[in-house]
Image (cartoon, helix red, strand yellow):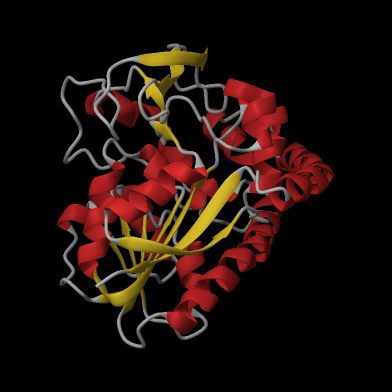
Amino acid sequence: MEPARTDSAPTSPSHDSAPAQSQACAACGCEEFTVLTKGSDRLYRTTTKEFQIVECRRCRLIRLFPRPAPSEIASYYPPEYWFVPNDEAADRLEERYRRFVLRDHLRFVRRALEAAPPEGLVLDVGCGGGLFLSMLAEQGVPVTGLDFSLDAAKAAWSRGVPAVCASLSHAPLAAGSCRLITMFHLLEHLYEPQSYVEAAYQLLRPAGRLILQVPNASSWQFLMLGERWTGCDIPRHLTVFRTADVEGLLERCGFTVVRKKFFSLRDNPAGLASSLAAWLDPMARRVRNPREGGRARLAKDLLYFALVLACLPVALLEAACGAGSTVMIEARKLT
C-alpha cells in the first residue's frame, strides 16, 4: 500500500536546463530568501546531508537550498524506486490497493478527456511504472508514457505501456500530437519547471488539456509537520509549490485553469501516514531493504494501511477547506 507518488515521480529529473551555478529563485531570479526549516532525507535515507527549505523574499516561492547538482541528485533516487509486482502475497495486495486508489485520478482525467480534442495521444510525463497509463489503456484510450529514467520506462513496458526514455523538451513527438498531457508529482522534481509546461504547450493540440498534480504548500499538513511533511521530500523536491504558484506558471505559459481538486485518495491520506511514520512506508522499506520475511512485510503493510485509513478523515477535512496536501489542476491550452 505505498503512496502513489512513486508511480509518477521521475527517478532522475531532466538535466537539460539545470543551472550549473545559480541558486537563485527559478521563478523570479531573486537570490534573497527566508529560511523556513531544514532537514535531510528522512524517507529513503540516501544521504545524511542537511538542506534548507527557503522562501523567496520577492515572489515567495518555496524551494530547496542548496539545490543539488545534477551529478549529485541522481544518487538520491535509488534503483528500487519503482514498484513492479511479483507473485508474493504482499505485492499482489499492494497492486490491488494501488489500482483502487488510482480510480480517483482516472475519473479526473476522463472528465478532462470529454472536453479535450477528440484525436491525439494521452501522454503521461514522468510515467514511472506505468500503472496509471495501463488502466487508462484498458478503457480504450491511446496512451504513451515518457520518463527521464530508463528503469521507469522498462517498468512501464513490462506492463504493456509504450514508454519513451527522454526529457519532455526532447520528446520524439510531433507538435500538436497530444490531446491531453498529465504530469503527476513531476514539476517539484525539476530544475526549471516552466520549460516542461512550455514544452507541453507545444505538444498539445488547440484547446488540449494539461493536468498537473503537485504537493500543496498551502496545506495544513505542511503547516503542522514542516520538514517532516512528505511534500517536502528532501532532497528530491527542488520546489514546493503553493496552488497560486502553479496557477501563475500556467498563465505565463499560455494556459487557463479550468478546475482544481484538493483531494487525492491515492496521495493525501498516504502522504500523511508516511509523514507520521516514515519507517512504515512500503516504498521506503523496499529501498532501505530491511531484513524482513514475507509475513513481517505483509504485517507492516497492513499496519500502514490501517494508519492510512486513520488519516483519511483529516485528509478529507483539509481538502474540503481548500487546504489539501495535494492540488490537481486541469488547464486548457489557449490559442
Asked which quadrant contains residue 202, the reply is bottom left
User: Which one is nearer the viewer's eye here, 233 or 2?
Assistant: 233
Asked which quadrant contains residue 172, the reply is bottom left
What residue do we see at 55% from left, 41% from top? Answer: 216
User: At which x and y percent is residue 60?
Assistant: 42, 28
**In the depicted structure, whether residue 298 falls above or below residue 114:** above
**In the depicted structure, whether residue 65 falls above or below residue 330:** above
What residue do we see at 16% from left, 41% from top? Answer: 16
**In the depicted structure, whether residue 31 falls above or below residue 302:** above
In which quadrant is the C terminus drawn?
Answer: bottom left
The answer to whether any part of residue 147 appears in the image is yes
User: Which one is nearer the viewer's eye here, 32 or 317?
Assistant: 32
Q: Is residue 246 left or right of residue 109?
A: left
**In the depicted structure, whether residue 276 falls above or below residue 215:** above
What residue do we see at 18% from left, 54% from top? Answer: 169
What residue do we see at 23% from left, 76% from top? Answer: 177
